[in-house]
Image (cartoon, rainbow, N blue to C red):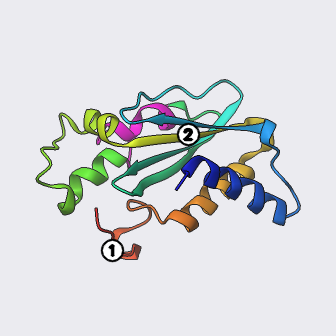
Amino acid sequence: MNLINEINTIIIEVSSVLGKPIEKHNYKIIDRGIPHQPKTLPIQSMGIYTFWYDGEFLKIGKAGPNSNARFFSQHYNPRSAKSTLAASILEDKAMQGKGINEGNVGQWIKNNCRRIDILLDSDLGIFSLELIEAALHYKYEPVYEGFAAQRKIHKV
């Protein structure tokens, strides 16, 4: 599966079917790879961030143009915000036994998760950001989205 091509197709097809196509020149998909180093949200941009591990997305989220901390750093620190990838990993019994703890979870994410970012021009507006996030949630059903009781069981 080529995730970059698949994500690109989702953006184009979902926005087009709604009669408001998001043109390719208004967004960029960046595969930061494994290991990865997070990058700041560029000025006049908003973004979707994704974390892929062991064949599935763990987290897919969004950050508006004024939410650089959410985009860049919060998911690597379990205490930095109400809901972070780091905190979800630490709470997940299926992830125990991998040597992950509060002190190393951020580095574990960088070393073991593939990060793919989608950068959008902020003048597209927040609804385009929310549309793409929702479409990716629907397609990929990330492990750590929503309340645990609402999620289907994953294999992580």
Callout 1 secondary element: loop
Visible residue check, residue 129: yes
Q: Amino acid at mark 2?
A: Asp
Residue where numbered disc 2 is placed: 117
Q: Where does the image place residue 99, in percent across and percent down from the top left?
A: 12, 44
Q: Is residue 126 magenta?
A: no
Q: Is residue 82 magenta?
A: yes
In the image, 100: left or right of 74?
Answer: left
In-front residue for pair 150/24:
24
Task: Identify whether 36 is placed above or below 84.
Answer: above
Q: Quadrant of residue 81?
A: top left
Q: Where does the image place residue 96, in percent across and percent down from the top left?
A: 14, 55
Quadrant, the C terminus: bottom left
Residue where numbered disc 1 is placed: 153
**What residue is drawn where x is 41% and y is 75%?**
150
Visible residue check, residue 80: no
Q: Outermost residue toward the front?
A: 1
**What residue is drawn where x is 41% and y is 42%?**
114
Task: Identify whether 50 is placed above or below 39.
Answer: below
In the image, 63: left or right of 79?
Answer: right
Are there few (<14), some (14-19), or many (20+) residues within 10 Å of tag 1? few
Callout 2 secondary element: strand
Are there few (<14), some (14-19), or many (20+) residues within 10 Å of tag 2? many
Q: Do the numbered discs 2 and 1 sit on residues whose CB atoms are within 8 Å?
A: no
Task: Identify whether 46 is placed above or below 134.
Answer: above
Q: Quadrant of residue 55?
A: bottom left
**What residue is drawn where x is 20% and y is 56%?**
95
In the image, 49: left or right of 5?
Answer: left
Residues under labels 2 and 1: Cα distance?
25 Å
The residue segment tinted magenta is 69-84
Name which of mark 2 and mark 1 comes first in the sequence: 2
Q: Where does the image place residue 149, in percent across and percent down from the top left?
A: 35, 75
